[in-house]
Amino acid sequence: MKKTTILILTITLSFFGFSQTTYSDIAPALYRNCTSCHRVGGGAPFSMLTYSDIAPWATAMQTAIQDGEMPPWAPDTSYMHFINERPLSPADRDTILAWINDGALEGNPALLPAPPVYPQYLLNGTPDTIINMTPFSSNAGANDAYNTFIIPLTMNQSRYVRAIEFVPGNPDLIHHSIIKADTAGDVLQNTTGNSFNILGDIAIGTWAPGSIPIVFPNSTQLKMGIEIPANGDIIMQIHTPSGTLGQSITCQIRLYFYPIGEPGIRPVYDFVPLQYWGFDFWIGPEQIKSFSTEANTYSFDISLFSAFPHSHQICTEILNYAYDTVSLDTVDLMKINNWDFEHQQYYTYKNLVKIPSDHKFHSDHTFDNTHHNHHNPFDPPQLITVGTGSNDEMLFDGFQFITYQTGDELINVDSILANDPLLNYTAIGIDKVSGPVESNSYVYPNPVTGKSFIYFNPRHRNWNDYTLKVWNIKGQSIDMSYTMKKGYFEINKGNLNANIYFYQISDSNGKVSSGKIVIQ
């Protein structure tokens, strides 16, 4: 009997030993989600392309993943979908955390998949204008620095920007850059390190490590561009992280213009309707407070292309929507559950979003000035008031839009850009397929022990059009309790036996997505 017990114990230990997760198991998840930033020259503090690079950071990774801070994708994808989303799927999350919990083992290097290749430039073709910034010595010592640089354009007539790529000389030295344009001389250069205001009337875009170049749609359905004035200025606000004092900062801006006289270009405009500067905008030490504001839209209907929400360091949540002032019906625009000042960008809607002239914009921001908020710039917490400094706070939510035309809301911007010849999706590790494709979906938590959710990418926002069917492993239809929400199904185990089941999401046009449910 004793020998039998020892044999069973040995087999059990061997099984668990072989089931441990190793670096080769998590490498595909890292390649998909992390290495666009976490690589040499990617701007992140360490690489994830090799085991020796990543092993010392396992504990920090665990904290960042469990807190939902990595990868840096702010919007809640169950509320609204955007182009080129970067949320970590539950499967990838569980695999990476399992690797850390198993001891962050290397495993067999021979089993590693080929790593992705990141070229110097992510846009194909030859730009019309290349702007090289004069080298600047970083003035970010103990604190981060914000500098505004002015680069004149020598164009004798106005041009429409079709695409723009920002290429830092060393991404480790630039936290982010906001790029604008204006008529010559309207904005002055400010290299004091305290240039917190984002100046310039014409917003072009923003860059942060891992950002994809800005490309506007150019198709028979939709052709968009930003008009830059003749002989105007390019304006760059560059945020340089602390500890880079004295290091040389350089960057290149690569501009692609539409041909002169190109017909049908719809001008892109930028505005910030949601701002709050009230005298009551202050958050005391150990306080959590929320502030709201509303604003009218234009006297004509508009189509939103992208959103740029903005607050500073102790903000935790942001909600944007528009609503009909008569019926009170809402248009979802943006929901962020874990705001991070260190990672912000323009978020491009998958479809243009129509905002009628009789609607109002609404914004809610929540601020956590307690010692529990590890983004708090003060320890212990201090009084924080509204202002433009990075240690102040702000509610400042903007959008890019075009004037509405009939049918705009039916235009799938995502599919247009997915087939754009300028953007090298393969090189930057984004899987884009032309034509209609089955939408991704996943169940979380899975296995299901009670209530779970099936998240999917909807083709449209008529939620009542989506249905869920479930089968057992014998192919027999199963009656599972579910409720359709906005962009996901809420399911319940009910009385179903522990087993594997299969689901399919459909709409009036057919199959949308499918997957597996594990019931425990």
Image: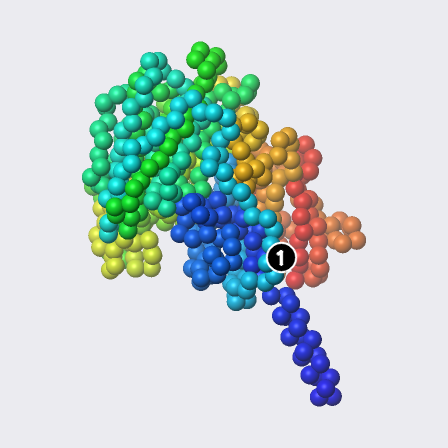
Residue at (64%, 75%) from the top-left corner?
A: 13
**Visible residue check, residue 240:** yes
Q: How many marks?
A: 1
Q: Is residue 105 above or below residue 8?
A: above
Measured as percent of width and height from the top left, residue 419 is found at 57, 29
**Visible residue check, residue 98:** no
User: What amino acid is at disc 1?
Assistant: Ala
Which image quarter is the C terminus in? bottom right
Q: Is residue 211 above or below residue 519?
A: above
Q: Which residue is mark 1?
A: 110
Q: Is residue 294 above or below residue 470?
A: above
Residue at (25%, 46%) from the top-left corner?
A: 246
Residue at (41%, 25%) from the top-left corner?
A: 255
Measured as percent of width and height from the top left, residue 231 is found at 30, 18
| Residue at the bottom extreme of this rendering | 2
Disc 1 packing (10 Å; few <14; some 14–19; many ≥20): few
Residue at (53%, 33%) from the top-left corner?
A: 424
